[in-house]
């Protein structure tokens, strides 16, 4: 297993390119199952999760080619010869559940392994299943697999989510595009990745209104065509790298960054004393003056503060002046980076879903363990600002969601290198 060694090296300066969004691409790729025609995704990120989704779709009989060094994905599922999404693939990546809705809508049946939990929580899929049942699916759980059928096809329905779920909204949205009649999704997720999916489905011929609001209305159509669609910029990668000059000092321009994707996050950075300004190519970030100030954070669905940036913000708050209270309201176990940050001298008290951070002047480099994707990168950020050397182990977590992190950071002056493990 590879490790990454980071040595505190002072302010950062330069440009970091922002890739296409992992969490948009992971729902855009299964959309190919809805149509016989080819789907081409440009600005695709080159990540291990994308490779896992590629393997899953190919196991169903879809064709997926990576062109232009992986930046373009050419997908086609005119010939599907398998309707079973196997546990061995699904257990590696929960987003695999997103093949269920499209496969059911187009073919009338699907067998998908339940994803199981992950480090940050149990992460059930009950909302996905209830939404598909509302659209007429007959579901049976057998030996860890969901057996779904809709022999007469799906029919439009009113679906009200008891609480916001990104994945359940995506599964229901894709399924509804081919359901007979009108579907209304209430309390739908409003994330930019949902908006991007709706834009792509509309290019394929779907009739959708209201994406980005709490109510999405879909008129089912008989079939969908092909499309070429650019994957939206990754707001979580963007927010992550905005924190690099925030925690180290200096000035970094995030190429391709869009301020509308990180509104709530930028408000917190401004309150903490970090300046964010729009440029012709993206966003420029630097510290206004002096030490970062502690601010409180509560995670919530978009347009609130993203849970996927909580770990990274905690790293910044570890070096801030004052006390910061971070409340994680989306997942039940998303503070695993805290004990690792404490090994670097951070002062953090965790009680249930609340972490209280008392900032310190300097963190100290130390060997630390990555536990999940976003925790991994928060340790990298802390290492950038720490005195001495930090060794982050198990960086396979990192490679799921960050393309060439050591290259992007060393290009702006960070002292960071990857050590290949056995
Ligand atoms: C998506 O996960 C993202 N993943 C997550 O990013 C992100 O943290 C999350 O949305 C919230 O923004 C992808 O898009 C591939 P949810 P998802 O359904 O769809 C509970 C990353 O780091 N829930 O909005 O799984 C669930 O347990 C990843 O890139 C149910 O109880 O998230 C969680 O507590 C991590 N039943 C909450 O709802 C369900 O049927 C929100 O989950 C579905 C969800």
Image (cartoon, rainbow, N blue to C red):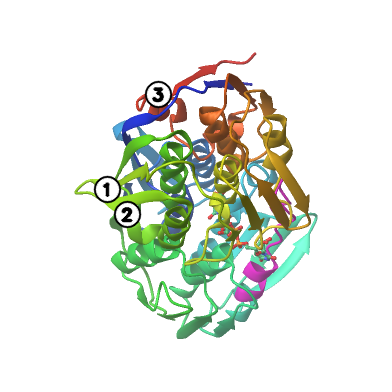
Q: Is mark 1 within 8 Å of ligand 1?
A: no
Residue contact between numbered discs 1 and 2, judged by CB atoms under 8 Å: yes
User: Does the magenta segment cover residue 216?
Assistant: no
- Ligand 1, seen in the image, is in the quarter at bottom right
Residue lying at 48% horizontally and 57% vertically, measured from the top left: 268
Count of residue discs: 3
Per the image, label 3 sits on a secondary structure element best described as: helix
Residue lying at 44% horizontally and 54% vertically, measured from the top left: 24
Give the percent coordinates (x, y) of residue 18.
Answer: 35, 42
Extent of the magenta region:
115-131
Residue 259 visible in image: yes
Give the percent coordinates (x, y) of residue 202.
Answer: 32, 69
Residue lying at 72% horizontally and 30% vertically, measured from the top left: 343
Residue 35 visible in image: no
The residue identified by callout 3 is 410
- Sequence-wise, which precedes: disc 2 or disc 3? 2
Per the image, label 2 sits on a secondary structure element best described as: loop
Q: Using a 10 Å C-alpha cutoff, classify the residue at mark 3 as few (fewer than 14 neighbours), some (14 to 19) or many (20 or more).
A: some
Give the percent coordinates (x, y) of residue 74.
Answer: 34, 44
The residue identified by callout 2 is 258
The residue identified by callout 1 is 282
Q: Name the dominant secondary structure of the magenta segment.
A: loop
- Sequence-wise, which precedes: disc 3 or disc 1? 1
- Sequence-wise, which precedes: disc 1 or disc 2? 2
**Quick one: 141 or 382, which is closer to the camera?**
382
Residue contact between numbered discs 3 and 1, judged by CB atoms under 8 Å: no
Per the image, label 1 sits on a secondary structure element best described as: strand
Q: Residue furthest left?
A: 280
């Amino acid at each position: 297993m590879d490790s990454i060694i980071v040595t505190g090296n002072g302010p950062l300066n330069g440009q970091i390119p922002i890739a296409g969004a992992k969490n948009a691409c992971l729902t855009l790729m299964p959309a190919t199952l809805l149509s016989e025609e080819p789907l081409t995704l440009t600005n695709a990120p080159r990540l291990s999760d994308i490779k896992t989704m590629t393997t899953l779709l190919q196991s169903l009989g879809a064709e997926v080619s990576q062109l232009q060094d992986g930046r373009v994905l050419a997908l086609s599922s005119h010939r599907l010869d398998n309707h079973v999404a196997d546990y061995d693939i699904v257990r590696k990546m929960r987003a695999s559940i997103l093949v269920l809705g499209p496969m059911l809508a187009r073919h009338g049946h699907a067998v998908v392994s339940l994803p199981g939990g992950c480090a940050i929580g149990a992460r059930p899929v009950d909302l996905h299943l209830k939404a598909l049942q509302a659209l007429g699916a007959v579901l049976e759980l057998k030996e860890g697999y969901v057996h779904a059928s809709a022999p007469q096809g799906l029919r439009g329905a009113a679906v009200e989510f008891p609480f916001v779920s990104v994945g359940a909204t995506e599964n229901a949205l894709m399924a509804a595009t081919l359901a007979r009649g009108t579907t209304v999704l209430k309390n739908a997720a409003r994330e930019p990745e949902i908006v991007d999916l709706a834009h792509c489905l509309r290019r394929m011929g779907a009739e959708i209104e209201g994406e980005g609001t709490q109510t999405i209305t879909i008129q089912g159509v008989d079939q969908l065509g092909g499309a070429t669609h650019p994957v939206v910029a990754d707001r979580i990668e963007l927010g992550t790298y905005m924190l690099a000059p925030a925690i180290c000092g200096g000035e970094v321009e995030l190429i391709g960054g869009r301020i509308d994707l990180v509104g709530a996050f930028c408000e917190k950075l401004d309150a903490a004393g970090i300046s964010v300004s729009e440029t012709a190519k993206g966003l420029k970030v630097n510290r206004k003056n002096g030490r970062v100030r502690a601010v409180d954070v509560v995670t919530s669905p978009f347009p609130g503060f993203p849970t996927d940036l909580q770990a990274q913000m905690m790293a910044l708050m570890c070096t801030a002046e004052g006390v910061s209270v971070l409340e994680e309201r989306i997942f039940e176990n998303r503070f695993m980076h805290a004990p690792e940050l404490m090994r670097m001298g951070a002062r953090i008290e965790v009680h249930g879903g609340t972490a209280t951070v008392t900032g310190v002047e300097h963190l100290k480099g130390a060997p630390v363990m990555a536990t999940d994707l976003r925790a991994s990168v928060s340790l990298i950020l802390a290492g950038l600002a720490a005195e001495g050397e930090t060794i982050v182990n198990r960086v396979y977590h990192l490679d799921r969601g960050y393309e060439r992190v050591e290259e992007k950071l060393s290009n702006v002056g960070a002292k960071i290198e990857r050590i290949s493990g056995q």
